[in-house]
Image: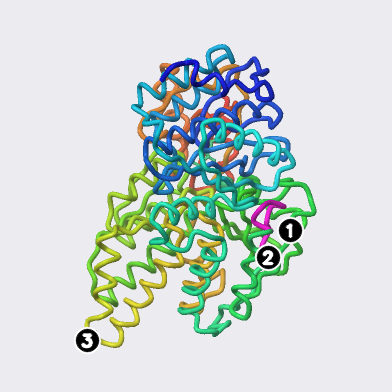
Amino acid sequence: MESSQLEHILNTNYSKKYKGSIQYGTAGFRTKADVLEHVLYRMGLLAVLRSKVKNAAIGLMITASHNIGSDNGVKLVDPAGEMLEATWELIATNLANVEDSNLIFTIKQIIEEQNVDMSTEATVIIGRDTRESSPTLLNAAIAGIQALHGIVKDFGIVTTPQLHYLVVCTNTNGGYGEPTLNGYYTKLSKAFKCIRKNKINNGLYVGVLSLDAANGVGAIATKEFNDYLAETITINMYNDGLGELNHMCGADYVKVQQMPPATVPLKPKVRCVSIDGDADRIIYFYLDENDKFHLLDGDRIATLVAAYFKELLRESRLSFQLGLIQTAYANGGSTNYISNVLQIPVVCTSTGVKHLHSKALEFDIGIYFEANGHGTVLFKETVIQTIKNTIKDPELSMIEKTAVSKLLNIIDMINQTVGDALSDMLLVETILHEKGWDITNWEKMYKDLPNKQLKVQVSDKNVITTTNAGRQCVTPKGLQEEIDKVVSKYEKGRSFVRPSGTEDIVRVYAECENSSDLNELIVNVASLVY
Ligand code: 16G
Ligand code: ZN
């Protein structure tokens, strides 16, 4: 391709004014919204090239998840709903940072190096969250897509997991579900209702919960979803979009601060959930009779789900290999419970969904959750086929048949494309309902070790590099030995430091047996980082 054929892509409306450099990180580009316009334009261009290479639709989501309202971001979604392939993350970073004078050359280079056939049709599926800056950034992305003659399918305001769902449905010609929001709500709610059979309460389980929507896009989705779920569960929503996005609310706030969101009225033992700004994370919490806050995070959801699957497999007499994927942030209490009580293999990967997702694919049924509430369950295609065939077996006993049919519904209820707060919520509610459990029964499955996180501001976070899934420092030299020395003084002590992939800080995590030791442990470790 000649450079002259690309001259029209230089659009002065989207010239690069920002002088700093910006990186495609764990969750795409994410920073102050006002420096992102040229990045969105260029990601529009790149999405078209990626779509041509894969000969499939690519997703483009405009969101900064749990970040403050003035931030924004963009991430590309590959055809099967996964995060953008790592080599293209580097291409994206380079493309976002080149000067305008090098833009044509860089695009030409990508076309040549990636063997892009420019005659292939390209489709980009776009979604955005509720941020004020999102429409402007959307226009920039559309301009980029159209500059390279890509087809735009704009789904407007959607949650991140809905966008992933729409990409997969489009690329499987509806095989995964109908590629519309109605298709999404119908698929999930139908499966939920099928298991629940209109019985709202069961034993100690009461079908009412409070939902903190972080004043984000999840509020819109929850309102829409409610019409499909009516009469099977009552969701009382707070932080429904009128207040400030992610401000003193949402899953990240509740998890990190270990306190309830500011504006949710709390009654003892009422199940509450917090989702994040783009509705791909969920955590549960409640207050007890003494107003003590109890958090049931991603680890708790993972263990509940894993135990449930184990039960269903036993009852259905199907033997599949179950695996659970966590990160270094998983509470030691949960890891111990999964390995020793449930006896399910546990794997620890680096932080970031793409790492957990790819590891989960190695199991017949791979359950992955980050402690922060991001996770889902993946089923191998062969597993789904076996389950579908088994249900037709006339020899099945009643118990077997019930379990197999539940498995089939559960598969439909789970958004396998990515962690999805609303889908995960239905899954948890289904399990609690079936067991007749209230939230305290769930919490009693195992004991969390007291734990804490701190952020440390440093001049260059990249001085710290890690190995062993982020659990050990490689550099600066000697730091790990110092951390080990501190940690060894505390019973069941564990602590690690790692540079954040989304903020310019270093994160410190610590846990130990005695809550009275926790502050001292984490402060001592943090002081080694300054
Ligand atoms: C991003 C990741 C999330 C991870 C978090 C870690 C995705 C879609 N999201 O939000 O999985 O837990 O980053 O942030 O991958 P940190 O590197 O700042 O600790
Ligand atoms: Zn999110």
Q: Earlier in the sequence, mark 2 or mark 3?
A: 2
Q: Is residue 66 magenta?
A: no
The quarter of the displayed image where residue 519 is located: top right
Q: Which residue is mark 3?
A: 394
Disc 2 marks a residue whose amino acid type is: Lys
Is 522 placed above or below 395 here? above
Asked if marks 1 and 2 touch (Cβ < 8 Å), the reply is: yes
Residue farthest left in this picture: 395
Q: Position of residue 354 (x, y in %)?
A: 42, 41
Residue beneath the point at 53% across and 70% down:
186
Q: Is residue 217 magenta?
A: yes
Which residue matches tag 1? 240
Numbered disc 1: secondary structure: loop
Q: Is residue 407 above or below residue 474?
A: below
Distance from the alpha carbon under mark 1 to that under mark 3: 48 Å
Q: Nearer the viewer, residue 137 or 301?
A: 137
Residue visible at 62% across and 42% down? 63
Does residue 455 appear in the picture of this structure?
yes
The percent coordinates of residue 106 (x first, y second) are 47, 18
Kind of residue at disc 3: Pro
What distance separates the C-alpha of mark 1 from that of mark 2?
9 Å
Residue bearing mark 2: 223
> Could you give the CA–CA distance between mark 2 and mark 3, rounded to whole angstroms?
41 Å
- The range drawn in magenta is 210-219
